[in-house]
Amino acid sequence: MAQYNHVADKTDQYQGFECLPGGEYKVQISDTDIVTPKSGNGEMIKIVYEIVADAQFDGRKIFDNIIVKHSSADAERIGKQKLNTIMALTGLKAMKDTAQLHGKTLTLLLGMKEYNGEKQNFIKKYLAFDSDGEESEAADEPETSKKPSFIKR
């Protein structure tokens, strides 16, 4: 138990949030962590993306769990393919620490599904940051050191 003094303010209450509409969102990776899935068999990288360059949804977060070790060979293969795609799109050729992903930008194509009666977003596809509905070969080009002004550093 910890002591904490607080007086409730009825005018300042959490309103929750709605799912994002399906579509493309330019994002920046803001946080990562390696955790054990609830099943207990494997490892996954938890990635937090933050929407950038979108007047309506700027700052909203999108969460992704990428399995990198698992007792299911298919789950591990798919997770590693996702990680390979993210690294290619962000110009990262090798990684020793997930923190190397922080600040990297890409575009996510989101869909919406229903799970246990609730609507939730899911990532349908990973795209290049400069993508306008078409996949770009920019992932093969070296990353420039100058980022657009709206990208958080």
Image (cartoon, helix red, strand yellow):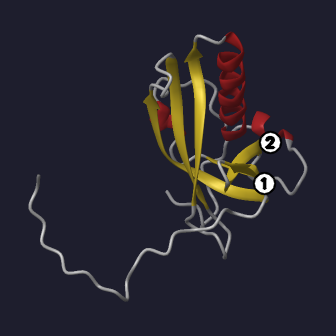
Q: Please give the name of the residue rendered at 50% of the width and 16% of the height, measured from the top-left corner.
A: 41
The spot of residue 73 in percent (x, y) is 68, 10
**Which quadrant of the figure has residue 5?**
bottom left
Q: Is residue 41 above or below residue 104?
A: above
Secondary structure type for disc 1 = loop
Q: Which residue is mark 1?
A: 130
Position of 89 with respect to 39 (left or right) is right
Q: Is residue 48 above or below residue 39?
A: below
Q: Residue furthest right?
A: 134
- Left or right of 15: which side holds 20? right
Picture coordinates of residue 79 (x, y %)?
A: 66, 25
The residue wearing badge 2 is: 138
Camera-side residue: 44 or 98? 44
Q: Indicate which disc, 2 or 1, sits on the residue closer to the N terminus.
A: 1
Q: Position of residue 30 (x, y in %)?
A: 50, 50
3D distance between C-alphas at marks 2 and 1: 8 Å
